[in-house]
Amino acid sequence: MQIVKIESCQVRENPNFEKMKEGREFVSVIFLTEQGNHIYVDLAYTAKGTMKIHILPIRHGNNKTYDKTIEIKLSDGTTVLDDLRVLD
């Protein structure tokens, strides 16, 4: 699967910033693939000095969909979290 363009990019307010211990804003990017599918990527900073990246390809047809979350320390680039889940 190849990304052909950025379809949308917005800075949005984070409604759960206190509960998630993330910043008041996050960046939401929607990519379009050559097959017409979308991939959502959210970037948020956290109170503990990390950057959280959440990647969610949207399912089309009977394909499996995965949910990937990566969290990186901004001070030294160390990966704090690298989680991959298969969604039903």
Image (cartoon, rainbow, N blue to C red):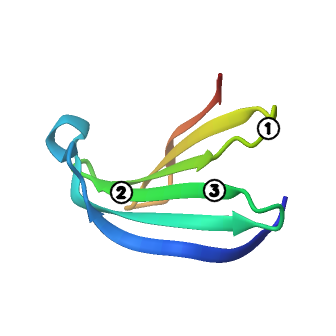
Residue that lies at the very extreme toward the left in this rendered image:
18
Please name the residue shown 25% across and 38% down the image.
20
Which part of the image, by quadrant, shows the N terminus?
bottom right
Please name the residue shown 70% across and 41% down the image.
59
Identify which residue, 25 or 45, lies in the foreground.
Answer: 25
Lateral position of residue 69 relative to residue 28, left or right: right
Q: Earlier in the sequence, mark 1 or mark 3?
A: 3
- The picture quadrant where one finds residue 6 is bottom right
Q: Which residue is mark 2?
A: 44
- Label at residue 61: 1
Q: Which tag is nearer the camera, tag 1 or tag 3? A: 1
User: Quick one: label 1, few (<14), some, or many (20+) residues within 10 Å?
Assistant: few
* 12 over 65 or under it: above or below: below
- Label at residue 39: 3
Please name the residue shown 65% across and 22% down the image.
88
Disc 3 residue type?
A: Ile
